[in-house]
Image (cartoon, rainbow, N blue to C red):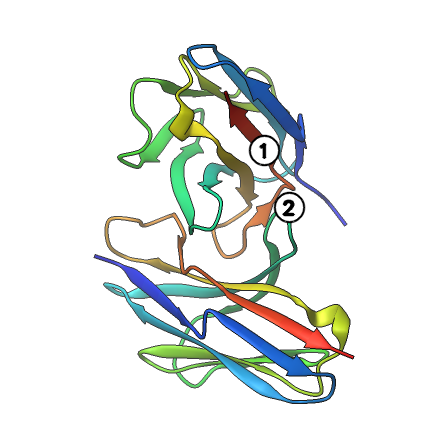
């Protein structure tokens, strides 16, 4: 069964304090690992898709990396506007072929 | 930037009543989805729709649920007889090629 586990559940940072969020996954053949940002009461907003181990993608202060078992979302010098819940999801070759399996998310709070 | 539009943003209904949640996916997308998120829990897959038929559904998507694409632009989720446990945020998503998924802002369904 495809599974996604994110840690930590919550992370509080000071503005400018860099850190990383973890997404561990179990999937029968990875078709894609997706990172989303979700603001309260809103839908997930797409950030990145990663397909193979060693791949990296960057967008502003965010950088996503992928290994065979986990992905990291690195946040460099975060600002208060980066506060949100960050969701990781996978799409595999197994039973959920076209569909995303989500983790519970990491709630990030950045204090000025 | 193209958006997935969902209406209404919030719906309150009495237990046992029927509700229809509406979505306008991105116009050139081919794959359509409904997900839901119970407060404090993971985003969960409900159903996928491709080529005018359901391509996959989860265990949650029982006989009380149905989906339709009545014309070229709308995609609806119907819950025939709502239960208290159906209270959740319902997200519509669409994809051109299953390499990226765009989510709407959601409908908050409250069953009383």
Q: Give the quarter of the image for residue A81.
A: bottom right
Tell me how many marks there are: 2
Q: Position of residue A68 (x, y in %)?
A: 32, 80
Q: Quadrant of the C terminus of chain A?
A: bottom right
Q: Which residue is mark 1?
A: B108
Number of other residues with Cα within 10 Å of mark 1, as a class: few under 14, some 14 to 19, many 20 or more: many
Question: For the point 30% across and 37% down, which residue is it?
Answer: B58
Q: Quadrant of the N terminus of chain A?
A: bottom left
From the viewer's side, name the closer residue of B109 and A100.
B109
Question: For the point 39% across and 48% down, which residue is it?
Answer: A99
Q: Give the quarter of the image for residue A26.
A: bottom left
From the viewer's side, name the closer residue of B86 and A26.
B86
Q: Which mark is residue A41?
A: 2
- Identity of the residue furthest to the front in this view: B112
| Marks 1 and 2 in Cβ contact (< 8 Å) | yes
Up-down relation of residue B60 to residue B65 (above or below):
below
Q: Chain of mark 2?
A: A
Mark 1 lies on a secondary structure that is strand
Q: Which mark is residue A74?
A: none
Question: For the point 49% across and 35% down, which residue is it?
Answer: B88
Q: Position of residue B19 (x, y in %)?
A: 52, 16
Question: For the point 33% across and 66% down, which residue is it?
Answer: A30
């Amino acid at each position: 069964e495809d599974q996604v586990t994110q840690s930590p559940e919550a992370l509080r940072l000071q503005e400018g304090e860099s850190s990383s969020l973890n997404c561990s996954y179990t999937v029968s053949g990875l078709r894609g690992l997706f990172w989303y940002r979700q603001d309260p009461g809103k839908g997930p907003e797409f950030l990145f898709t990663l397909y193979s181990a060693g791949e990296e993608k960057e967008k502003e202060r965010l950088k996503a990396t992928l290994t065979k078992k986990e992905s990291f979302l690195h946040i460099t010098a975060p600002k208060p506007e980066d506060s949100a819940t960050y969701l990781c999801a996978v799409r595999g070759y197994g039973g959920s072929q076209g569909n995303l399996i989500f983790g519970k998310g990491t709630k990030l709070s950045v204090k000025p | 930037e193209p958006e997935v539009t969902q209406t209404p943003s919030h719906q309150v209904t009495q237990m046992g009543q029927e509700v229809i949640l509406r979505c306008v996916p991105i116009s050139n997308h081919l794959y359509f989805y409904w997900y839901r998120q119970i407060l404090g829990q993971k985003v969960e897959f409900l159903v996928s729709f491709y080529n005018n038929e359901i391509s996959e559904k989860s265990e949650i998507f029982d006989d009380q649920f149905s989906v339709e694409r009545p014309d070229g632009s709308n995609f609806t989720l119907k819950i025939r007889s709502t239960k208290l446990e159906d209270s959740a945020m319902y997200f519509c998503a669409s994809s051109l090629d299953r390499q990226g998924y765009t989510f709407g802002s959601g409908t908050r369904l409250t069953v009383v």
